[in-house]
Image (tube, rainbow, N blue to C red):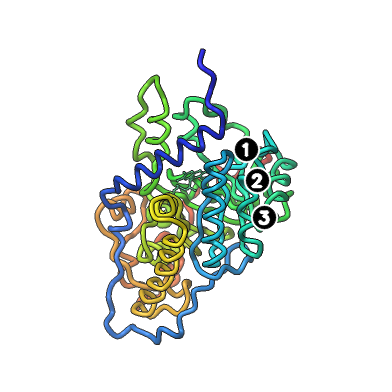
Amino acid sequence: MNEPPSIGDRKDEHVRYATEQHRRGFAGNDFDRVNFLHHALAGIDRADVDLTCEVAGMRWPAPLYINGMTGGSSRTGSINRRLAVAAAETGLPIGSGSMSAYLRDESVADTYLALRQENPRGIVMANVNAATPVDEVRRAVDLLEADAVQIHLNSVQEIVMPEGDRDFSGWPRQIEAVATRIDVPVIVKEVGFGLSAKTIALLRDLGVAVADVGGRGGTDFARIENKRRAGEDFDFLAGWGQSTPCCLLDAAPLHGIDIIASGGIRSALDTARALALGARATGVAGAFLTILLDRGPDALITAIRGWLDQLTSIMTVLGARTPQDLTRADLAITGDVAQFCRAMGIRPTAYGRRSVAPCTEQHAGPRSAAPPEYVATALDTPTGRR
Ligand SMILES: Cc1cc2nc3c(=O)[nH]c(=O)nc-3n(C[C@H](O)[C@H](O)[C@H](O)COP(=O)(O)O)c2cc1C
């Protein structure tokens, strides 16, 4: 029987296949179906735009972060070092890749530590899987002196991954233990298949501070893991899950948890669209990694600075002084995204004139209350807590 690949080998393969996807490009995504209505007299003075935002009580300099990707091998350690330089130069918060490799073998600590060494004053997030016990989450946070911890939910990836986990039954209980006992904010994220409103409501009830919807539209880990397998073909799972705009629309009525968005964010315009759909900040993974590997760290720094500059310009035209102001911008929601809304009982048309029809229902999102089944699920949590 063949030995399963080491975690380090797997991390190298993820980088290779993810960048291949980004180099090949994507034939559009659901953000193309969410467009701002142009109001020609809405413009403001660009000098009045302030990009700062608040996530779980942390002040972030802009609503953009470098999402968790890698570490665990010498190649990915060098990638982390260069990503951290870009984070330090631009002020963006940065996530680590999953730290399971470090938790099993301390000799790879340096491949993660680079994130803090190159970025001593920046906002750094540790990253663990949803089965990680509280003590080990603390070790991961301590290593990076992390400001927050990301817990990734990736059942679809694990199922397709030849050496992946098959038992997800303990995840809710473990997440609750971490959320209630770790003293930095806990962010739960998907890795590109999306969080439903039902899942986000459950996470909130488990004590989680932030949900990163991590939707479909960019890096596709079903495809990546399918390439890594020799046996049965899981090709049919490519494209599984909800896109990032659909996740945000689904989650709009939820309160009591901060929502941020990643998955298929390609430009400053996608950031603005996600903020308009209620995200407090947006994360980018594969696109930034590909710029770094193809063109180097200086190009990534230039790209991030350009992104923030363009976001400021878009907000100026839309009359939004703060990211929060974008949640009142009018949006035309069309095509597959409008179809999704209709299938889920969300009124996409309510977004079209929300700047001039500020009724409570539209401010809260066009579906004013979470459907009753979300409450039922929360009651079903392992501890019965709500
Ligand atoms: C090479 C690579 C490795 C990744 N590894 C992790 C990981 O270890 N933990 C995690 O939470 N997400 C991981 N992700 C997922 C990203 O954080 C993100 O959720 C996903 O790629 C979708 O965002 P994107 O479309 O901007 O790439 C990885 C992404 C890439 C590209």
Ligand 1 within 8 Å of the CB at mark 2: no
Report crowding for label 3: few under 14, some 14 to 19, many 20 or more residues within 10 A (C-alpha). Answer: many
Tell which of 83 and 199 is nearer to you.
83
Q: Amino acid at mark 3?
A: Ala
SS at circle 3: loop
Left-right relation of 34 to 77: left
Left-right relation of 311 to 154: left
Residue at the disc numbered 2: 110
Q: Amino acid at mark 1?
A: Ser
Report crowding for label 2: few under 14, some 14 to 19, many 20 or more residues within 10 A (C-alpha). Answer: many
**Residue 193: image x %, image y %?**
43, 43
* Residue lying furthest top: 1
Q: Is residue 107 visible?
A: yes
Which tag, 1 or 2, sits closer to the chain's start?
1
- Residues at circles 1 and 3 in contact by the CB criterion of under 8 Å: no
**Residue 262: image x %, image y %?**
45, 54
Left-right relation of 89 to 333: right
Ligand 1 within 8 Å of the CB at mark 3: no
Say which quarter of the image contains residue 121. Answer: bottom right
**Residue 260: image x %, image y %?**
50, 58
Residue at the disc numbered 1: 100
Residue at the disc numbered 3: 146
Residue found 53% across the figure and 73% down from its top? 52
**Residue 231: image x %, image y %?**
39, 19
Tell which of 370 and 18 is nearer to you.
18
Q: Amino acid at mark 2?
A: Asp
Residue found 53% across the figure and 54% down from its top? 82
Tell which of 296 and 210 is nearer to you.
296
